[in-house]
Image (tube, rainbow, N blue to C red):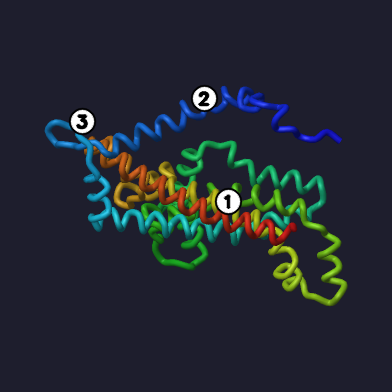
Amino acid sequence: MVRYDAERVGAAPWMLSGPALLVFGALLLAPLLLTAVLSLNLFSDSAGVMPGYSLGNYAEVFSDNYFHEIFLRTGAMALAVTVLCVLLGIPETIIIARMAPRWRSLFLLVVLGPLLISVVVRTLGWAILLGNNGLINDALQALGIVDQPVRMLFTQVGVIIALTHVLVPFMVIAVWATLQRLDLQVEWAGLSLGASRLTVFRRIILPQIMPGVLSGSIIVFALAASAFATPAIIGGRRLKVVATAAYDEFLGTLNWPLGAAIAMLLLLANLIIILGCSKLAERRFKQVFE
């Protein structure tokens, strides 16, 4: 058995990973650093970005109820999308995992296939479906459920529906990875001892797939909170989220420092939530598999 000797290996890992680290730093860390510096710049309507530095942009975001509403709306939408992805992704993954191999591959491809299509194309499809003359409203009126079209386009509900469709495959992938470690004999043992399927799911299956659920929730929440294309197309110009608000500051009012401050606050909020959930996921993972 070959043992890892850190002293003998020396600097080889750093030399091998050095090019990748340089690319990572150049393409991600450097733009983030420049954005953070830009968020501290002063801004004037007449002179534009000025060389001075101040925390005034952050103070404006924290003191303005307009931005409070936008951040709260974004967090609520991201949380709603995450809950829906959990409710849809868990049973969907379990059902696919229980299928025969030939059907399993086909339905897994159907679920993950939308990832191969541009998010803009999928969102435009939902814009057509959710419109007043779209397929959904036509079906509701044909069935006699409603007398007039239900307004779903340019609403928060419409954005949540579209984002859920866009992001549920990420939940399926995360749950699928942990579901492969599930020992079916434990599940069969619970059923043979008289436990109901609901009890087996709650006491045996769910605790073991919880690390995947938490990991998928982190991914879905982060992507939903920072989504731009779907809220911009489905929500329109009036339903602002953090990403569209930053976009408007950059290209609408040309207040780049304020737009950079909004973007950095979104990044910071996502990092805090992701790190907190990651700690919870790691703790849960150790409890299940140790």
- Secondary structure at numbered mark 3: strand
Q: Which numbered disc, 3 or 2, marks the residue that appears first in the sequence? A: 2
Q: Is residue 100 left or right of residue 147?
A: right
Badge 1 amino acid: Val
Measured as percent of width and height from the top left, residue 52 is found at 20, 34
The residue beneath circle 2 is 22
Front-lying residue, 259 or 50: 50
Q: Is residue 168 left or right of residue 188?
A: left
What separation in Å lies between label 3 and label 1 (alpha carbons)?
44 Å
Front-lying residue, 263 or 286: 286
Residue at image position (27%, 35%) is 251
Residue at image position (39%, 47%) is 266
Location of residue 201 by image quarter: bottom right
Q: Residues within 10 Å of mark 3 (few under 14, many from 20)?
A: few
Q: Is residue 16 above or below residue 72?
A: above
Badge 2 amino acid: Leu
Q: Which numbered disc, 1 or 2, marks the residue that appears first in the sequence? A: 2
Location of residue 13 by image quarter: top right
Front-lying residue, 168 or 242: 242
What separation in Å lies between label 3 and label 2 (alpha carbons)?
29 Å
Determine which of the numbered discs, if any, sits on residue 51 in the image.
3
Are the residues at dot 3 and dot 2 in contact (C-beta closer than 8 Å)? no
Q: Which numbered disc, 3 or 1, marks the residue that appears first in the sequence? A: 3
Q: Point out the frontmost of discs 1 and 2.
A: 2
Measured as percent of width and height from the top left, residue 243 is found at 37, 44
The residue beneath circle 1 is 168
Tell me the quarter of the image containing the C terminus.
bottom right
- Secondary structure at numbered mark 2: helix
